Image (cartoon, rainbow, N blue to C red):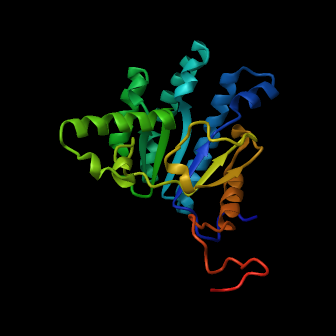
Amino acid sequence: MSLRPDFPVPEHVAIIMDGNGRWARKGGMIRVRGHESGTESVRDVVEASAEWGVKHLTLYAFSVENWSRPKAEVSALMSLLKKFLNKERETLLKNGIALRGLGRLEDLPDSVLRTLREIEKETAHGTKMTLRLALSYGGRQEMVDAVRVLSQDISSGKVQATEVNEESLAGYLYDSDMPDPDLIIRTAGEKRLSNFLLWQASYAEFVYTDILWPEFRRGDLLAALQEFDGRVRRFGKVLDTDPEPQGSSSP
């Protein structure tokens, strides 16, 4: 397989990066070593996505539920995140990649949030691809936060309740500029959303792989994109190319 797609790539790819802990345990290492190794996969996938023409890449890096993990692991993850952001700053700039955080970012440690905001500002002009890191993110929490702000706007008269529809509500999500994902990839064999992009994933295609995230590389991404390319996306409609059931008659 050539390590470059010879077919149209999806506009927006989202990835649930799972399996860091299992990878570390398999090698007899502490969990943090898995997270550290996983950053190499992030680097390879980000660079490949930008190179291949993916316009939006969203990585599920830290969920709101992850705050309940042991304090030592959370602290190590936050330290690793800050280190990763600083290390990749120049790569993002060089490749024209805009970085954005997605989630309840105010929950992040001050130093991490400050670094994230600095790099968001520095890379904002990047037009090749937008990389979103879902941090302290939860799909249900995103909808709660959106409804809360919308309710305030309705109470103040800024918005009329009768005007609320799917499009207007979507404008209250964490990033109203983010298109819905075309493809969601999950590694490590699990087959669930885990509270990720619940609103946006309504018509996404899913590809699951048993590969643990620290072992996931551009060749695995290409295989997922190739599987996506073979899908027929109906968005709830019946297409002219769909075969008629045997015994049916046209009206």
Q: Quadrant of residue 35?
A: top right
103 or 141: nearer the viewer:
141
Left or right side of 80 for 130: left
How many numbered marks are there? 0
Q: Pick the quarter of the image with the C terminus.
A: bottom right
- Expressed as whole percent of the image width and height from the top left, the position of residue 90 reads 44, 43
- Residue drawn where x is 78% and y is 44% of the image: 210
Task: Give the answer, above or below, for where 69 lies relative to 56.
Answer: above
Q: Pick the quarter of the image with the N terminus.
A: bottom right
- Residue drawn where x is 73% and y is 81% of the image: 248
- Expressed as whole percent of the image width and height from the top left, the position of residue 66 reads 57, 25
- Expressed as whole percent of the image width and height from the top left, the position of residue 211 reads 76, 43
Q: Quadrant of residue 152?
A: top left
Q: Residue at the far top: name it.
A: 71
- Residue drawn where x is 61% and y is 18% of the image: 69
Left or right side of 122 for 33: right
Left or right side of 226 for 90: left
Can residue 200 be seen at all in this image of the molecule? yes
68 or 225: nearer the viewer:
68
207 or 245: nearer the viewer:
245
Task: Give the answer, above or below, for where 174 lies relative to 179.
Answer: above
Q: Residue at the far left: name it.
A: 157
- Expressed as whole percent of the image width and height from the top left, the position of residue 20 reads 69, 32
Q: Quadrant of residue 73?
A: top right
Can residue 3 be seen at all in this image of the molecule? no
Task: Give the answer, above or below, for where 219 lies relative to 21.
Answer: below
